Amino acid sequence: MIEIRQATPNHLEELVKVFEAYRVWYRKDSNPAEATKFLSERITNKESVIYIAMENNEVLGFTQLYPLFSSTRMKKMWLLNDLFVYKQHRGKGISKQLINAAKDLCRNTNGCAVMLETEMNNDIGNKLYPATGFDLNTDHNFYEWSCQT
């Protein structure tokens, strides 16, 4: 049975593995040492909420959410920044379970929305998100300024 639980420092070793698989999927170089530091800081500093999908003490996938605030709505909202399930475990509804955990987090924190973005060529995500109740926002432009160091 697949269980969704919030990640703690005790899950860090397995979390780093799935996080690195996610990053590689997004064409980033693997860097387990930096990933460990990054995830440890997020968990320890309570800067994000990370849910993991587990079965028989094995992490199958994860999602990471960051808190944001909407001035116009005067409420907290959540950015679903990361969602990944190992390829061999896809098709079992794990992504939907992780998304439902994100929606529950929004409700339980009196939030107003869960936002996310994905690449236009992410066929899996672009089918998954509408199927789980997300609407494509075509009313706004999305801009980014990147600080290059």
Image: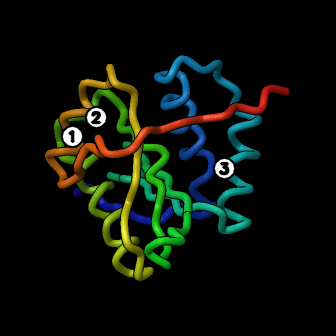
Residue 118 percent coordinates (x, y): 39, 34
Which mark is in front, 3 or 2?
2
Q: Decide which of 28, 119 is in the foreground and name it.
A: 119
57 lies above or below 35: below
Q: Type of residue at label 1?
A: Leu
Q: Looking at the picture, tell me which residue is in the foreground, 136 or 81.
A: 136
Vertical arrangement, residue 73 with respect to residue 135, above or below: below
Disc with the residue nearer the chain's start (1 vs 3)? 3
Could you tell me how far apart the alpha carbons at marks 1 and 2 are, in whole angstroms? 5 Å
Residue indicated by mark 3: 39
Q: Looking at the rendered structure, which numbered label has been put on residue 125?
A: 2
- Which residue extends farthest right? 149
Placement of the C terminus among the 4 image quadrants = top right
Q: Is residue 37 above or below residue 90?
A: below
Q: Are marks 1 and 2 in contact (CB under 8 Å)?
A: yes
Q: Are marks 3 and 2 in contact (CB under 8 Å)?
A: no
Q: Secondary structure at mark 1?
A: helix
Write the residue at 28% across / 34% down. Answer: 125
Report whether 69 appears left or right of 31.
left
From mark 1 to mark 3, how far is it between C-alphas? 25 Å
What is the distance, in whole Å, between disc 3 and disc 2 at their CAs?
Answer: 23 Å
The residue lying at 76 percent from left, 46 percent from top is 37
Q: Note whether 110 is above or below 15 in the view shown.
A: below
Q: Quadrant of the N terminus?
A: bottom left
x then y, percent, for residue 77:
46, 67
**95 lies left or right of 28:** left
Q: Position of residue 7 (x, y in %)?
A: 53, 61
- Which dot marks residue 128? 1
